[in-house]
Amino acid sequence: MRIAIVNNFFPPRMGGSAYVSDTLARHYAAAGHEVLVITAAYGGALPVEERDGLRIVRLPSWTLPETRISFNFDITFALKWGNRKRVFKLLDDFKPDVIHQHGQFFDLTWQSGLWARKNKVPSLLTLHTRLQSPVKLVHGVFRVLDALVVRPITAYNKPTKVVAIDTVFDEYIKKRYKIPDSRIEKLAVGVELDRFTNLSRSIERDRVRAKYGIGDGPLIASLGHVIPVRDRLNLIEALPMILEKHPDTKVMVVGGMYFTAFLDRAKELGVDHALICTGTLPKPEIPGILAASDLEIHDLQGFGIGIASLEAMAAGTPTVIAERGDYFPSATITNGIESLLVKPGDHQGLAAAVHKLLDDPALAEKVGQAGKQWVFDNFDMPKICEANLDILKSIAGKA
């Protein structure tokens, strides 16, 4: 089967959807399928690259200025003169049996959707980001964009199936895009669990602490790009209370710094000395940092449970999350078992949850191991990849 993968985000660009689409593409190729990846140019990446059984074509692009509208994030678009013809030519030559698109508001999704409609080729659209914001004005702009741009284009292209990666996305797709349940597949993201096996927490603890000059106090990892919907502000608000009881605590923020209000607030509260900001790190370094940490905390605004939280759990690191327990339709989180759940904006409750885990190592170990088992039971990436492949085969008539 010939499968075209389309995503504006793809490695070397970092991020959740880039990671997912790359992993899926490699899985499809390893399963014997011919795979073409169409993405936007990024950094110094080659315009055409062949690796892992994939042919990757990166089209000329431009990057949206880092503003609140773009989540203060480097969002790359391929809306350049001649790119539509390039996309159509690539697909004409490749003759895909099916297209797997990622991201409902990306121009490459729209262009490949037009080609799929014209050529009557089935497509699967996976949504990774909801157009929502904690800033009311920006949230209003997003609603207008969804209603006047994304919904009409999606309705016109009419992807054969749409993937809802969680319960909230399922509700969002039905409400914002009026897509019926019959065209929605409920399928979570996955984690490459082999990256988190054979980790020695004691060895990683010593290595990471030596590398970053961290003492023997508690280490809280906060993994993932800092953007308005994951701004770390609530963690900073809780930090004075955490430091009052555990004065040697350090918070390691790992990811791109696209929204730095938390740094200003940390200085105002006099807790900036407890922060270590590493920026974006290579993927192989992440498991060790998570295993070295006593806790992982970053999903605090009720905008979902991301891959970073799942990776922390896979490493056996206890997490504190501000999200509903039924966020994933087939895998419920029980508060106090797989994770500690708090309310968005409740920094006092967050500090109390941190104290609860730091003051009771046996409980922290129990929560860490339960979370690890929960992820291993429900989010094994090869199984998720195979489920995606089954959908592609079904809509392509290759099942």
Image (spheres, rainbow, N blue to C red):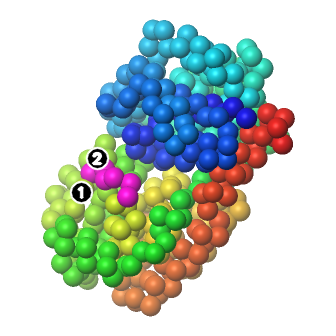
Task: Give the residue type at disc 1.
Answer: Cys
Residue bearing mark 1: 277
* Residue sitting nearer the eye, 97 or 355: 97
> Decide: marks 2, 1 in contact (CB < 8 A)?
yes
Give neighbour class at mark 1: few <14, some 14-19, many 20+ (Cα, 10 Å): some
Closer to the camera in the image, 327 or 199:
199
- Residue 280 part of the magenta segment: yes
**Which stretch did the figure color magenta?**
279-284
Say how many tags the image has: 2
Q: Residue at x 33, y 82 (%)?
A: 202
Residue 235: quadrant of the picture: bottom left
Label 2 crowding class (10 Å Cα cut-off): few <14, some 14-19, many 20+?
Answer: some
Q: Is residue 270 visible?
A: yes
Residue 84 placement: quadrant: top right
Give the left or right position of residue 258, taking residue 162 as reference. left
Q: Is residue 21 above or below residue 322?
A: above
Image position of 91 (left or right of 272): right
- Residue at 20 percent across and 52 percent down: it is 264
Q: x and y percent of residue 168 in the render?
A: 63, 51
Where residue 151 sits in the image (x, y, percent)? 65, 26
In this rendering, the answer to whether 180 lies above or below 146 is: below
Which residue type does callout 2 highlight?
Met
Label 2 to label 1, Cα distance in Å?
9 Å
Using the image, tell me which numbered label, if any, was put on residue 257.
Answer: 2
Mark 1 falls on what kind of element? strand
Tag 1 or tag 2, which sits nearer the N-term? Answer: 2
Q: Considering the image in quadrants, where does the C terminus appear? A: top right
Q: x and y percent of residue 55 in the render?
A: 53, 31
Q: Is residue 36 left or right of residue 273?
A: right
